[in-house]
Image: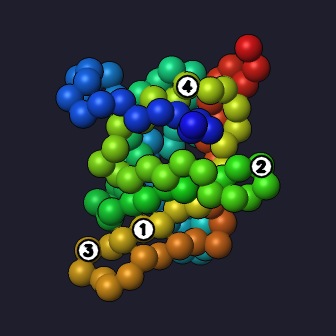
């Protein structure tokens, strides 16, 4: 059972229904910037990097354990309101490994309470 979202089947809906959530590596702060930072419940999203780097998101439980994993090619539906923290893994083209910033990202799904 997912904490924040559930995958929608490939080919469901159109790209006009998908909100792009831009996630970028902030080298100065060894963290990430997220835009938008707040979305409404039941929004369908796809996490992307504006520089075209491959991206993997690992949402965290309140205890800091990994929960849902989302890649930049997956379409997800935000089904539960709340504030969600996540770790990011960037894979720049031509480089042999992932970049994992110390500080992750946060996204708020509104309303946070029913």
The residue beneath circle 2 is: 62
Q: Residue at x 42, y 76 (%)?
A: 98
Res 79 label: 4
The residue beneath circle 1 is: 90
Q: Is residue 98 left or right of residue 100?
A: left
Dot 3 crowding, Cα within 10 Å, few <14, some 14–19, many 20+: few
Dot 4 crowding, Cα within 10 Å, few <14, some 14–19, many 20+: some
Q: Residue at x 77, y 49 (%)?
A: 62
Q: Is residue 87 left or right of residue 10?
A: right
Q: Nearer the viewer, mark 4 or mark 1?
A: 4
Mark found first going from the N terminus, 2 or 1 = 2
Q: Nearer the viewer, mark 3 or mark 2?
A: 2
Label 3 and label 1: CA atoms lie apart by 10 Å
Check disc 2 and report its element: helix, strand or loop. loop
Dot 2 crowding, Cα within 10 Å, few <14, some 14–19, many 20+: few
CB atoms at circles 3 and 1 under 8 Å apart?
Answer: no
């Amino acid at each position: 059972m997912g904490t924040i979202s559930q995958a929608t089947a490939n080919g469901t809906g159109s790209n006009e229904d998908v909100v792009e959530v831009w996630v970028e590596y902030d080298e100065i702060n060894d963290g990430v910037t997220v835009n938008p930072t707040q979305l409404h419940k039941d929004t369908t999203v796809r996490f992307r990097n504006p520089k075209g780097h491959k991206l993997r998101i690992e949402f965290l439980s309140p205890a800091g354990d990994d929960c849902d994993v989302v890649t930049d090619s997956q379409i997800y539906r935000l089904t539960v309101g709340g504030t969600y923290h996540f770790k990011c893994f960037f894979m720049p083209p031509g480089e042999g490994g992932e970049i994992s910033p110390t500080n992750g990202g946060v996204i708020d799904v509104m309303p946070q309470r029913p």
